[in-house]
Amino acid sequence: MQAVILAAGMGSRLNTMTGGGSKALVEIGGRPLILHTLEALADHGVGPVLVIVGHEADKLQEVIGDRAEVLLNERFAETNSLYSLWLARDWVKGEFLLLNCDLFFDPQILDELLDEPGNVIAYDSTSSRGREQTKVALRKRRVVDIGKDLPATSARGESLGMLKFDAGGARTMLATASELIADGHENAWVIEATRIVCRQVEVFGLNVAGHAWAEIDFPYDLDVARREVWPKIYRGRWRKLVLWKRARLGVIGIGLAVVALGGWFLNSRMGPASVDWETVDVEGGQRVTLAHYADEQRWWLAPKDSAIVAVVTNPEADIQLRLLHPEGATDSLRFVVALSVDGETVDWRALTSVVDTASRFATWTVGDRDRIRLSLKPGTHRISVTLVDGHASLMLVRVRQPVIRED
C-alpha cells in the first residue's frame, strides 16, 4: 500500500518554538517528527511513501534521505494541502494512506487502521470541542460529514488527519481534488475534498480513543506531544520489547536444547567434532577492544551511514551489534540498520538498545548485544551492515561465521 504525507506548509503558528521551521522537523523524543511517521509506516509494511514538501524542502529532503520519495510543491506559499495532494495524482496507483505531517501518533493506531476494510478515517470520540478541530459526524459507522465548522453537539469525535482509501475511494478522492483545483480552489484544505467524497462513497470511522496522539498546530500541542504523548508511546514500545525478549529467550532456549541433543546424537555415531565461531575481519570502521566481564572482544566502531563490510565463506553468518549511548541519553534507544548481501539490500532492522552494565568501551555507555542471523547460499559473500537511523550515531559491529573442527 502506498502512502502520501502532506508536509509542504509553513507551520507559522509554531514559529515561536521552531523559528519559522517546518512542522515536520520539530523534534520529539530526540528525533524529527517526520521520522517517527516514516518509521511507523515502514514497520507496518506500508510503501512506497511520497512526501509532498515545500517550506524548508532542502532540510526535509536531507532528513528523509532515501526513506521516501519527495515531490516539491513550488507554490506552497500560495496554495494549501488540497493542491499538494493534487500534485500526487499521477503517483498514486491504487489504495493509499493519506497523512498530515503534523500528526504524532501511537503506531497501534496505524495497525488498527490497516486492519479495516474499505475507506476509513481515524477519529477520537473523546475530542471534538475546539474550533480548530476537524470534527466527524457519523451515522452508525459511516462518516456523513466532516469539517471544522460542524457543531460540536452533532460531532462524534475529532479526525486525526489519517485516512485510508481503497482503490475506488482513491480514484474518487483524486478526481474530486482535480475538479476543485480546476474550479480555482487551489487554496482549499484536503478536508474539503474529503467532505465531498464522503457523500459519494462509503467512508467509515475508526474510533481510536484511548490511544496516544497529538495534532501539532500550536506551541501547546508540541508541549503536550513531548510531555504526555511521547512517554505513553515509548512505554508501549518498551512493553513490547520486554515481551519479545522473553519470548525470544524461550525460543532460543528450546533451539539450543534441540541443537545440543542433535549434536550429542551425531557425535555418538559419527565421531567427535565441534563447531566454533570465528570473528571475521571487516572493511570500514575502526577496530577496537570491548571488555565484557573478564573477556576482551574484537569489535569494529562504525559511525552512522558508514558501511561495515565482511567477506564470509560459510552459508551462515552471525551479525552482532551494540549501540553506543550518547552522554545523557535514556537507557533505552531505538536504531535502524540496513543489511546488504553482495551489493543488494536484503533487510532493514529496527532495534532497541538497553544499557549493558557488564560491557565497557572507553568512556561510552554500551548497549546490549543485538544479533541478526543470516542464512546464505553456498559460496563467498560480502555482507554490509550500516547504521542508517536512530537515537545515536555510533555502534559496534562484529561479524562471525561457524567453523567446524574435527577433534
Image (cartoon, helix red, strand yellow):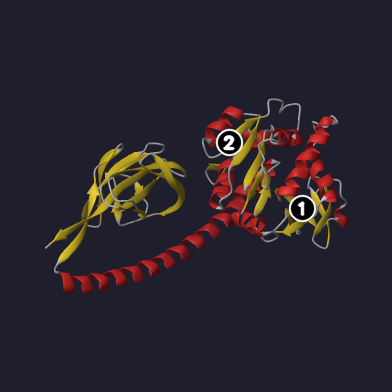
At x 71%, y 28%, the residue is 76
Residue 304 in percent (x, y) is at 41, 38
33 with respect to 151 (left or right) = left
Using the image as rendered, state which of residue 300 and residue 152 is in the foreground: 300
At x 64%, y 46%, the residue is 223
At x 67%, y 47%, the residue is 97
Q: Name the residue under label 1.
A: 158
Q: What element carries label 1?
A: strand
Label 1 or label 2, whichever comes before in sequence order: 2
Using the image as rendered, state which of residue 372 and residue 12 is in the foreground: 372
Tell me if mark 2 has few (under 14), some (14-19) or many (20+) residues whose alpha carbon lies within 10 angstroms of its own. Answer: some
Whether residue 329 can be seen here: no
Looking at numbered disc 2 in the image, what kind of residue is underneath it? Glu
Using the image as rendered, state which of residue 95 and residue 12 is in the foreground: 95
Whether residue 197 can be seen here: yes
Q: Mark 2 points at which residue?
A: 69
Residue extending farthest left = 407
342 with respect to 196 (left or right) = left
Q: Is mark 2 on a helix, strand or loop?
A: strand
Nearer to us of marks 1 and 2 is 2
Residue 256 in percent (x, y) is at 31, 68
Looking at numbered disc 1 in the image, what kind of residue is underneath it? Glu
277 with respect to 231 (left or right) = left
State if disc 2 and disc 1 touch (CB < 8 Å): no
